[in-house]
Image (tube, rainbow, N blue to C red):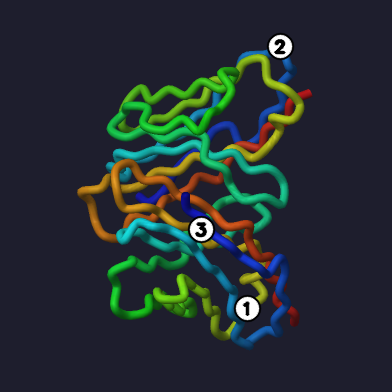
Amino acid sequence: DTEVTQTPKHLVMGMTNKKSLKCEQHMGHRAMYWYKQKAKKPPELMFVYSYEKLSINESVPSRFSPECPNSSLLNLHLHALQPEDSALYLCASSQDKGGSRNTEAFFGQGTRLTVV
Amino acid sequence: AQKITQTQPGMFVQEKEAVTLDCTYDTSDPSYGLFWYKQPSSGEMIFLIYQGSYDQQNATEGRYSLNFQKARKSANLVISASQLGDSAMYFCAMREGRGTYKYIFGTGTRLKVLA
């Protein structure tokens, strides 16, 4: 199983709503990532979890709150978003540093978020 | 600071022809990895090929090969025998080898394969 599964695939939310994006992988990867991708732009790193601990926060606004309940799951809690937060949110996972040499990141299909 | 540069916003190639997508990178870390991903309109990032900074030979994966020129800090992707299904956005990415991994992406090249 080399899949990263993201739900939901599409999400429309109002600026006062609270919602969560979910990501799951069963490849035994100990690093998990959230990326944000605007149209016609490359993915931008938001957060990295390593061994279920937040390792990197790329100065992301606090209205985005990540959570890693266990080694297979990664959530992104959304609250009081702005229309400019509308984007494709991609989850990824990869081997930890002690793993195989081919440390490619595996990506999910993403959640297309629209903030209205 | 690391940086990935893809200078070709868009490329066209005839079906069954080969095409080269350019990528240059900048890092001071001696240990790094270079990756190419394909992103169709559906949005998923599909891993294509990997090159490690210490690898002596260029990576190949089926119709994909990576022309790695370490001294020039370039890692160009070559797609042979292009197919219509190859039409997509292609991203070059780099991962540094120390501590927690970060994957940083170039701006991408949109490839269109013509019938």
Is the same chain shared between marks 3 and 1? yes
**Amino acid carrying mark 3 in the image:** Ile
Neighbours of disc 2 within 10 Å: few (<14), some (14-19), many (20+): few
Task: Give residue A77's position: percent from left, percent from top.
Answer: 54, 20
Asked whether the residues under the numbered discs 3 and 1 touch, taking CB atoms below 8 Å apart as contact, a structural biologist would say: no
**Subunit bearing disc 3:** B
Q: Which residue is mark 2?
A: A16
Image quadrant holding the C terminus of chain B, namely bottom right
Task: Give residue A23's position: percent from left, percent from top.
Answer: 46, 34
Q: Residue at x 28, y 42 (%)?
A: A28
Residue furthest out toward the left: A98
**Subunit bearing disc 1:** B
Q: Residue at x 72, y 69 (%)?
A: B10
Looking at the picture, tell me which residue is in the foreground, A71 or A44. Answer: A44
Label 3, label 2: how far apart the Cα atoms are: 34 Å
Label 3, label 1: how far apart the Cα atoms are: 16 Å
Q: Which residue is mark 1?
A: B83
**Amino acid carrying mark 1 in the image:** Gln
- In the picture provided, is A112 more to the left or to the right than B98? right
- Look at the picture and state if B6 lies above or below B62: above
Q: Earlier in the sequence, mark 3 or mark 1?
A: 3
